[in-house]
Image: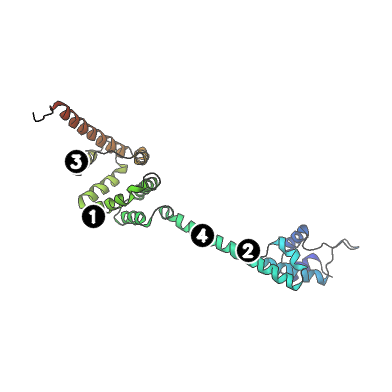
Amino acid sequence: MLTISQLAATAGVTVRTVRHYHHVGLLPEPARDASGYRRYSAQAAVDLIRIRTLADAGVPLAHIDALLHAQPTEFASAITYIDVELQRKIDQLTDYRRRIAELASGERLVLPPEVVAILDRMRSLGVSERRIRAERDSWILMQALDSHVMPQRIRDKNASFDDPETMRLYLACDQSVDWDPHDPRLDRLIDDMDAWEIKHERDNSQPGYLKLVVSRISEASPAWQRIIDALTYRAERRRTAVSDTEVSTPATSDS
């Protein structure tokens, strides 16, 4: 006859594990003998080893009791079912791991490969992660709210990376994020960016979703807020000037 400690050692488990198996009803708990100790038979040791073996193989404790008392054909059928369930869980966990790995890079889970390639290209060009995150957010919103413009936007973005002047201004703006809003370097940058806007016939207007992104960026950088405000003001003045010119010029017609 074995004490609980000897039983646990025989099966290679802890006393606490034996008591847990008693608690869940897998292993009967013998009555105490005259000396007040619980004594276990050799059959209890065999049962405990079988329980431990099944548990180590991944069989849920809820299924072990039925397996311990099953006939050979029932046992084989039950094991096959459990194996199928374990494989299903393995497949599910593998999928979870894949998705977690994709989440590590953020954009790959929600954006098409062409956009991910743009973000990776920005990294290779030395653009800060802060700016890349803002760029990623704008693509996510564009895909959700205005997806039909994405192919042209992707082409335009790649073309801008091939233009040295555009990239110079892009990187300069990126570097200005932590400048003081009164830094004199911002004046030159604003002038250069405004000249670029005029050259490329941009009016500084933006879709609603991009305004959300720009707003979040400007909140984090007073320097960027000044750039955005200055460019918006200048673009508005140009539009007003054009409108005034059209109104003051009399229409002509052949008579």
Q: Amino acid at mark 3?
A: Ile
Q: Nearer the viewer, residue 102 or 251?
A: 251
Mark 3 neighbour class, 10 Å CA radius: few under 14, some 14 to 19, many 20 or more: few
Closer to the eye: label 2 or 4: 2
Q: Nearer the viewer, residue 249 or 131?
A: 249
Give the residue at mark 3.
198
Q: Amino acid at mark 1?
A: Asp
Q: Quadrant of residue 70?
A: bottom right
Give the residue at mark 1.
162
Q: Position of residue 242 (x, y in %)?
A: 18, 32
Closer to the eye: label 2 or 1: 2
Secondary structure beneath dot 2 equals helix
Task: First in sequence, mark 1 or 4: give its number.
Answer: 4
Secondary structure beneath dot 1 equals loop
Closer to the eye: label 4 or 3: 3
Q: CA distance from mark 3 to mark 2?
A: 64 Å
Q: Is residue 112 visible?
A: yes
